[in-house]
Amino acid sequence: MPMCFNLFGELHNDKSRLSAAGSELFGSSKPGLTVKFEHSPRRQSTDYSNDGTAFDVALYFGEPDGSQSIVGIETKYHEHAVAEPKPDTPKKDKRTGDIRPIPPDKLKMPRYRGLSEAAIAKGIFKPNWEDLLGTELQQIWRDHLLLLSMLVHPSGKWKEGRYVLVHPGANRAFAEAAETYQTEFLDDSSTFDVVTIEELLKPGLLHTKTAQKDFETRYLW
């Protein structure tokens, strides 16, 4: 998260720079609205993805009282893409070692399944989406589901959106994971993208020249 703050922090409270970055980096035609870090519209809500997932940073575009678009961003640095347990896998009680059943109202898969099947109907996911459960792609999928849940929210507030995975060019683990996710599980990639930090820095929109040099010295290899 410190890297994420340093990468996108200068867009905060600077709507003209946010608008320029949105247009040049993310293809947004709407004016910049706001930047929110570690953000979910509401965690643990069945209105959305019904879990604790949040974007590292969310860039909002549009009008405060009108329709909006969102770019939800997950940043990776040196970490590897690793497998997660499948959703709703029972956990052991740390004190007794007993397997603790998950109460029906705490299960995540019903909402995940509903969002995924809706995405198939819209031509976004391929029918084989369950093959990624329990793999290193599961976190990418859950982040993507959060974005998709906003686009189908009954309020109709978010008309457009995209989930973007950001990583250094040298982080091959997430480059390969993103490519696998995109090619093997998506029929339509309009709501998903992957971009390197180097590509985001190239236009010189995210920082002053001095700050960009400092960022590159600290984080790139």
Image: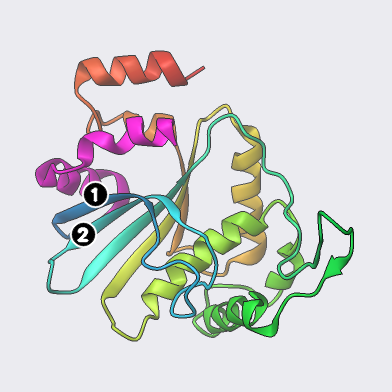
Asked whether, in this view, residue 144 is left or right of residue 69, the answer is: right
- Quarter of the view holding residue 208: top left
Q: Which residues are magenta?
A: 1-27
**Main SS category, magenta section:** helix
How far across and how far down the image is residue 217, in percent? 40, 13
Marks 2 and 1: CB-CB under 8 Å? yes
Q: Amino acid at mark 2?
A: Phe
* Residue at the farthest front position: 95
In this view, 212 is above or below 155:
above
Magenta highlight on residue 19: yes
Q: Give the residue at mark 2.
A: 61
Q: Earlier in the sequence, mark 2 or mark 1?
A: 1
Q: Nearer the viewer, residue 140 or 84?
A: 84
In this view, 211 is above or below 8:
above
Disc number at residue 91?
Answer: none
Instruction: Compute the Cα span from label 2 to label 1.
Output: 8 Å
Magenta highlight on residue 8: yes
- Residue drawn at point x = 88 percent, y = 59 percent: 96
Q: Give the residue at mark 1.
A: 22
How far across and how far down the image is residue 180, in percent? 66, 53
Asked whether, in this view, residue 162 is left or right of residue 136, the answer is: left
How far across and how far down the image is residue 37, in percent? 34, 47
Q: Amino acid at mark 1?
A: Gly
How far across and how far down the image is residue 157, in percent? 26, 76
